[in-house]
Amino acid sequence: MKRNGLKGPENIEMIAFTDRGEKLAAELAAGLGDGCGFIRSGEPLSLKDWTREHFPSAGGLVYVGAVGIAVRAIAPFITHKSQDPPVVVVDEGGKYIIPILSGHLGGANDLAKRLAEICGGEAVITTATDLRGAFAVDEWAKRQNCIILEHEKIKDVSGSILAGNSVRVRSRWEIDGDIPDGCRMAGEEDPDPDIALDIGYSEGNSMHLVPRICRLGIGCRKGITEKQIEDFFNEFISEAGIYEESIAGVASIDLKAEEEGLLRFCREHGWDLVTYSSQELGEVEGSFTGSPLVSRVTGVDNVCERSAVRASGGGELICGKKAKDGITMAIAREYYRPDWRWKSE
């Protein structure tokens, strides 16, 4: 298997402003482990330049110093809770650890708790659902590897729960564990639940939670363009009735590892491209749509279906081979079993 990394690792970046803060930052970085880096402000980047560089790509930002300094630093770069990284502020004495951005969706609340454990400080959590111990749908979505399609509905669902009402939940999968207070499973009499957990299109006014559990297998002729792949993908995903947000990555044969049009397509969507040898694809078990021509060219009878299933860990092929203008696509779904865990123990 060959992995073509199109995205950087999700790491934590940390910056300190004083000698004392720098010592604490070193302790926190060591506690978080590999993938966490720290610098002193101005060495070599200014605070503004450091924030500009890391805000779009880091898995989290930690400012060791005053809250006001951190707020002013991130203010020009804030876009939306679905895109912003988690941001945490730690005072230079390590007494208080305060998440100030993307508490639930980004995971700032959890990051603050981890940092508090390392330095013995107190995580200061201010989100209403946390303060009252209420079910937080955005935190639940993150823990279940889901994308929320309608972020504006988070406040409606949370508001209803905080008001003492129950929200109706429908899921394609059975959900393990005890259902939390404030939730109930939607019945047949509830055609339009408050929360819908699925990878396929559904109508109505639900908040849709889409698990990222699908792998898109692609085969293509040499010299295919990004636009050709994009146009076919839009047609393919629409016919399949599956949310694009459910796609977690793309797979193909190693002959396409450097195919520029395919790489550009993956890069545009933020997906990794994983490729396999013909032998690896030939070892995938299942019933696939074979082609003598494909077998002669690649050494295996099918690329898109076999690569999708291989990348999904031997999951279910839910959309079989479709072909158009020298491109083939298929989708396989990983095994998925959600549960009701939504907060750190």
Image (spheres, helix red, strand yellow):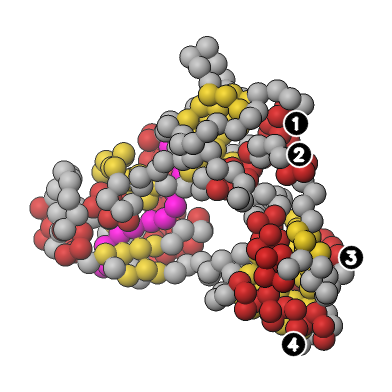
Side (left or right) of 284 relative to 117: left
Q: Residues within 10 Å of mark 3 (few under 14, many from 20)?
A: few
Q: Nearer the viewer, residue 142 or 233?
A: 142
| Residue occupied by mark 1 | 162
Helix, strand or loop at mark 1: helix
The magenta stretch is 242-256
Horizontal and vertical percent for residue 49? Answer: 76, 76
Q: Residues within 10 Å of mark 4 (few under 14, many from 20)?
A: few
Q: Amino acid at mark 4?
A: Pro
Helix, strand or loop at mark 4: loop
Q: Nearer the viewer, residue 36 or 322?
A: 36
Q: Amino acid at mark 2?
A: Arg
Earlier-in-chain disc, 3 versus 1? 3
For discs 2 and 1, the disc positioned in front in the rendered view: 2
Horizontal and vertical percent for residue 24? Answer: 75, 79
Image quadrant assignment for residue 240: top left
In this view of the protein, can residue 137 be seen by the observer? yes
Q: CA distance from mark 4 to mark 2?
A: 43 Å
| Residue occupied by mark 4 | 44
Earlier-in-chain disc, 4 versus 2? 4
For discs 4 and 2, the disc positioned in front in the rendered view: 2
Earlier-in-chain disc, 1 versus 4? 4
Label ID, residue 68: 3
Name of the residue lying farthest toward the right: 68
Does residue 343 lie above or below 197 as drawn? below
Name of the residue lying farthest toward the front: 120
